[in-house]
Amino acid sequence: MTATIKFGTSGWRAIIAEDFTFANVRLAAAAIAEHVRSRNAKPTLIVGHDPRFFGEEFARAAAEILREHGVHVLECQGPAPTPAIAYEILRRKVDGAINFTASHNPAEYQGLKFSGPDGGPALPEVTRDIEARAVKIGTRAPAKPNDAPFENINPRDAYLQRLEQLVNFKAIADAKLSVVTDALHGCGAEYLDRVLAAHGVDVQALRIDRDVLFDGSGPDVSEKNLRPTRDAVLAKKAAAGLATDGDADRFGILDSDGTWMQPNHILALLYDYIVESRGWKMPAGRSVATSHMMDAVAKHYGTTVFQTPVGFKYIGELIQKDKIAMGGEESAGMTIRGHIPEKDGILACLLVAEMIAARRATLAEQLGALFQRLGREFWPQRTNLHLPEDIKRETVERLKTDFSTFLGRRVKSLDRTDGLKIEFDDGAWVLLRLSGTEPLMRIYTEAATPQESTSIASQTQAWIMGAAKEAKA
């Protein structure tokens, strides 16, 4: 057996029965056990899973191997959101967690997220160590497991109590908001809808049942996947639609008219609201692929922004060091000061509801007002390219060029934090990078109008494909 365990920006993900097999899960668990025991002779790990196919079985297989390797296991009862597990790590002061989830990926994927004792996603030096240990273990079969029961835990109540300390539920209830929640058949069920209902909010909860095929698509909080949410928001005349992805670490937001709100815009609105409502006049943290609208908000408050590579683990580090009021990524992940160093889609949805209630304005109205206050508009876009391997390699090589012009525009600056980000004189920019979770090249663009952002993306795609044709000619 050859080790095929490779961690990306958010854990190890692979197609079930292809690379994500019981043999490789046991190998990964043995490598993680060795890693944690190198730091603590008697470690404790939480083992959880989302509602995906074979989630319980993969989690049990890993737990058995961990136990055989001297790790005490706390097994989650039923599916548990990534943010709830992260909070439980901190609350119990354990050595970390293994969570079986492929997050928003399609149904044929499974995944494994490893979190350390700080509750955040494992940093690259940790995942490299685990990968190296898996290679060394190789064909050395892990010890034979036994089927004795594990200590069971349920992280829900403690996590929901923590949210009550972070969110102004009274403001939401006083505004008499009605909302639609959508768990997309994922872990948000019985969490987001439950805590809102417990505080007297009128809630209609969608897709809270288990469906391992996720309606034939995947538990991604995309505009397309939230069409049923849109229909429910319009029918109910709700103030908002609030959705979470498969493991509830990402958010999806619809305005009262059913409009899907870009995560980038939600992040900027929430940062503005957090500084205003909490009085945290502190920097924000964002990935290199995230809108510069957060930078404009920071400048408005006389502060700044920390830019990180893609991967929430880097935002998590800033949260742990109390350097930022809020951190976010364009892929719909965020957290706030004093909370977990991990994406929390449930918290994001609750803060959006609080923001709507406190400001007594729709999200479109709030976005328009913020654009006006900042003196310009920000329209980001992400394009996914499925490219042959040879074209991907050629493009990566060409991106090593020190461009002074690109697409006929003068280049203001080049940023190689993660991929290549090219910023133009007028504030527009384009970023090209390989995905860390899917076999894609991503093009991120931002400009002052949606049309210009689309145009930059189209021209960049043509630049990639045109050069590929020339190379073959």
Image: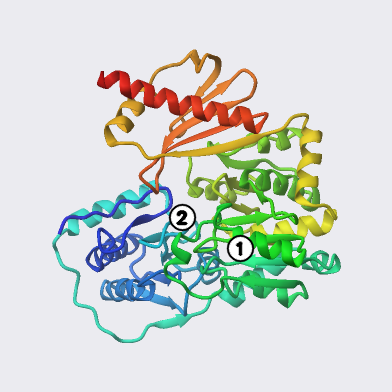
**Where does residue 62 sit, x and y in percent of width and height?**
31, 71
Badge 2 element = loop
Q: Quadrant where the N terminus lies?
A: bottom left
- Left or right of 157? Residue 366 is right
The type of residue carrying mark 2 is Pro
Crowd around label 2: few <14 · some 14–19 · many ≥20 (10 Å):
many
Residue in the picture at 41% in, 42% down: 435
In this rendering, does residue 199 appear at all? yes
Which quadrant holds residue 307? Answer: top right
Q: Name the residue under label 2.
A: 121
- Left or right of 78? Residue 391 is left
Q: Mark 1 points at which residue?
A: 228
**Where does residue 290 sit, x and y in percent of width and height?**
57, 39
Residue in the picture at 54% in, 63% down: 248
The type of residue carrying mark 1 is Pro
Distance (Cα) linking label 1 and label 2: 32 Å
Which is nearer the eye, 203 or 400? 203
* Label whose residue precedes the other's in the sequence (1 or 2): 2
In this rendering, does residue 415 appear at all? no
Badge 1 element = helix
Which dot marks residue 416?
none
Residue in the picture at 48% in, 66% down: 215
